[in-house]
Amino acid sequence: MYDFDTLLNRKGSDSYKWDGLSKEYGDPDLMPFWVADMDFKPLPDLDEALRARTVDATYGYTFAGADYYRSITGWYGRRHGLAVSPEEIVNVPGVLTGLHMTLAALAKPGDRIIINTPVYPPFFKLGEDGRYTVLQSPLKEAAGRYYLDFTDLEEKMKKGARFYVLCSPHNPSGRIWSREELLELVALCRRYGVILLSDEIHGDLAMPGQIHHPLLSLSEEARKVSIVASAPSKTFNCAGLKSSFLIIPDEEMRRKVRRKIESYHIDIDLFGLLAAKVVFEKGDRWLDELMRYLQDNALAMKDFIQARLPGVKAYMPDASYLFWLDCRGTNLSQEELVRRLKTEGRLALNDGVLFGPEGTGYVRFNFGTPRSYLEKGFEGLERALGTASIQASPAAAGA
Ligand SMILES: Cc1ncc(COP(=O)(O)O)c(C=O)c1O
């Protein structure tokens, strides 16, 4: 049994999540349930391997060896039943770097890129320098579940969109797209010549009983139009060790993307390579236990919210460790909602509007933390959004 009950002390380590509170929220003492990394001790084998690597103290230029590629292909075979060949893997330090580099290699200035909103905020920046236009296709929501709007997507493709960046599973809602939805998406992309970039960084974090469908596992058609970006970082809580990869089955696209990445001399460092190798070789049991722990956390949080916060709806995510909390029932304005969570709840959460206009009335809450600490978060939510405080506040009514 691995230990997920001990809170990792991350203060004073230049941790974005813990030490970034002053900069982001102007208050270093808030409880951080924002940035998407976890507060658990890492896989012990990772710790050991990193320590062992410093013994010989050689830190020169390093390449990704055959055992690194084997660890990734082995992982995909075991965990997803997907055959990935080492040649298809293109290394990048981060998933976002991979997405940006892919566009830099394959897109022309002025090209249109579809994203779905609400979505992980850096997706909006894929066109930030003005080279490309980002088109937002809002997801449809029904009973707390998001769905792709195929009519809107087809409309945008008809008008000449050339790329589609899909978040699969979806951040912030944790939705796993079904095989049928993904196949329909692939068919649309094939019909209109759209290249599908699938960000699957949350793909190893399916809740027990749920199955994530890697895009490349769907069909030969999917392999022709798709590029997948992923990493061990979200799954194994090692985002500070830069190590990610693209999987590009199409030879021509792969050649172009590789050339672009090489032209910028972008590479993974030796600790990133080592981390990927170790977690993919030795992390299966840790991840299975983690997912059971996270599912228990999520169920406890859902129950708490249902019992104590009638204005808030927490829908179980299919994957990952993020709750996309629907607070519209509190009738608080977004400003007041965020203010209360911070000043009364003492919580640092992600403001829903950062994920797109559809995020109004929402906040994102990261429950990837030991239960005892999570429970302090529950108390914060209750202080901020409990029935009594909402009813007592003149700002609440219709605000
Ligand atoms: C959907 C998604 N993509 C990418 C990232 C960041 O990946 P990286 O740090 O490898 O660029 C995150 C981090 O939260 C994420 O949620």
Image (cartoon, rainbow, N blue to C red):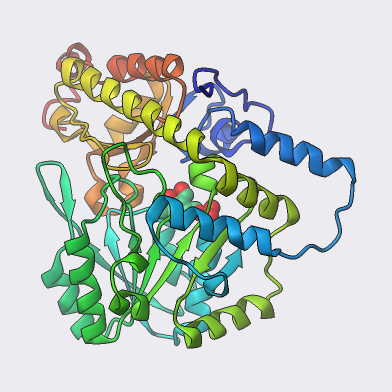
Instruction: Using the rendered view, name the quadrant where residue 220 is placed.
Output: bottom left
Return the residue nearer the eye: 131 or 278: 278
Say above or below: 300 vs 159. above
- Give the residue displayed 47% in from the left and 37% down from the top: 287
Percent coordinates x, y for residue 169 in the rendering? 33, 52
Above or below, 245 against 256 in this view is above
Using the rendered view, name the quadrant where residue 196 is placed. bottom left
Res 354 seen here: yes
> Foreground residue, 301 or 231?
231
Q: Image quadrant for the C terminus?
A: top left
Q: Nearer the viewer, residue 225 or 133?
A: 225
| 135 left or right, relative to 237 | left
In the image, residue 369 above or below residue 246: above
Q: Quadrant of residue 238?
A: top right
Q: Is residue 174 left or right of residue 158?
A: right
Total number of numbered discs in the rendering: 0
**How far from the left and from the top, in percent, is residue 328?**
16, 35
Kindly identify the residue that appears in the image at 75 percent across and 65 percent down. 63
Q: Position of residue 62 (x, y in %)?
A: 79, 62
Residue 14 appears in view: no
